[in-house]
């Protein structure tokens, strides 16, 4: 399993392909299922046009929390591997914010673990979004 | 070298409200997370504020000792 919290933009589809190739020893021929969630930045939220966003995080705790939930997912479900990548810093609309990918032998475990990881990440991982709108900057309210 | 201080970190809207991102406090008189908030802020801990001790989720009554890193932050909005 692998966790990355990074400032740089990334292409989630290339990352999934590259990770699969880099870990072909345990994935090639075995992972019958790959479940992928990609979260992108929208240009509208809560009734306002959003032109940019800044993602704040808690360096250290954020990575630790992602490692913790990835470990929990691999304990709860029979999965082969997982990859989480999350941006911080400035973002513009349509850029990917987060990637969660899970490899398993069969689809049930991949779907369930992927869903668990993105839900846990959204409710507990220390990230905060601040949007830039025409009315100024505002902190995004939790779901 | 003994570390007698507690590092306190603030994030997002709480960082903005307090106007700073970090404090270093003398540990004397501080037993738990809530004691720290009372020392650094004039107002009660905002509802729904999350707290962490040494980068693990904690509660206002979680004990704190010298050398610890304590953080206060609002509900998270990543993903």
Image (cartoon, rainbow, N blue to C red):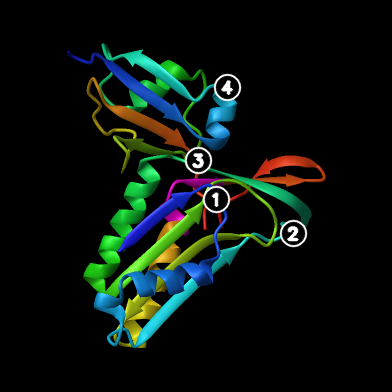
Q: Where A57 falls versus A73 (above or below)? A: above
Q: Where A95 falls versus A130 (above or below)? A: below
Q: Nearer the viewer, mark 4 or mark 1?
A: 1
> In the rendered view, does A110 fall on the left or right side of A74?
right
- Residue at far right of view: A134
> In the rendered view, does A51 fall on the left or right side of B14?
right
Q: CA distance from mark 3 to mark 2?
A: 22 Å
Using the rendered image, report if marks 4 and 3 lie on a common chain: yes
Q: Where does label 3 land, which residue?
A: B74
Please tell me which of labels 2 and 1 falls first in the chain.
Answer: 1
Q: How far across and how far down the image is residue A73, in percent?
A: 29, 67
User: Residue A85 in magenta?
Assistant: no
Q: Where does label 1 land, which residue?
A: A8
> In the rendered view, does A124 fall on the left or right side of A138?
left
What chain does badge 1 belong to? A
User: Residue A124 in magenta?
Assistant: yes
Q: Where does label 4 land, which residue?
A: B19
Q: Secondary structure at mark 1?
A: loop
Q: Nearer the viewer, mark 3 or mark 1?
A: 1
Q: Where does label 2 land, which residue?
A: A44
Q: Residues within 10 Å of mark 2 (few under 14, many from 20)?
A: few
Q: Residue at x 41, y 54 (%)?
A: A4
Q: Nearer the viewer, mark 3 or mark 2?
A: 2
Residue extent of the magenta highlight: A122-128
């Amino acid at each position: 399993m692998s966790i990355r919290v990074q400032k740089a933009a990334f292409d989630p589809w290339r990352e999934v392909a590259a990770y699969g190739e880099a870990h072909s020893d345990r994935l090639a021929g075995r992972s019958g299922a790959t479940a992928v969630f990609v979260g992108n930045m929208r240009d509208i939220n809560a009734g306002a046009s959003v032109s940019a966003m800044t993602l704040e995080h808690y360096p250290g705790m954020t990575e630790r929390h992602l490692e913790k939930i990835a470990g929990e997912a691999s304990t709860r479900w029979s999965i082969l591997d997982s990859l989480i990548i999350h941006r911080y810093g400035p973002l513009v609309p349509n850029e990917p914010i987060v990637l969660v990918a899970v490899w398993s032998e069969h689809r049930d475990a991949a779907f369930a673990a992927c869903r668990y990881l993105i839900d846990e990440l959204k409710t507990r991982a220390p990230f905060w979004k601040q949007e830039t709108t025409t009315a100024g900057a505002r902190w995004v309210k939790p779901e | 070298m003994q570390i007698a201080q507690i590092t306190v970190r603030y994030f997002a809207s709480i960082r903005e409200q307090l106007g700073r991102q970090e404090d270093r406090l003398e540990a004397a008189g501080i037993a738990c997370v809530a004691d720290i908030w009372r020392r650094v802020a004039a107002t009660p801990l905002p509802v729904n504020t999350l707290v962490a001790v040494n980068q693990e989720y904690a509660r206002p009554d979680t004990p704190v000792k010298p050398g610890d890193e304590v953080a206060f932050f609002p509900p998270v909005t990543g993903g």
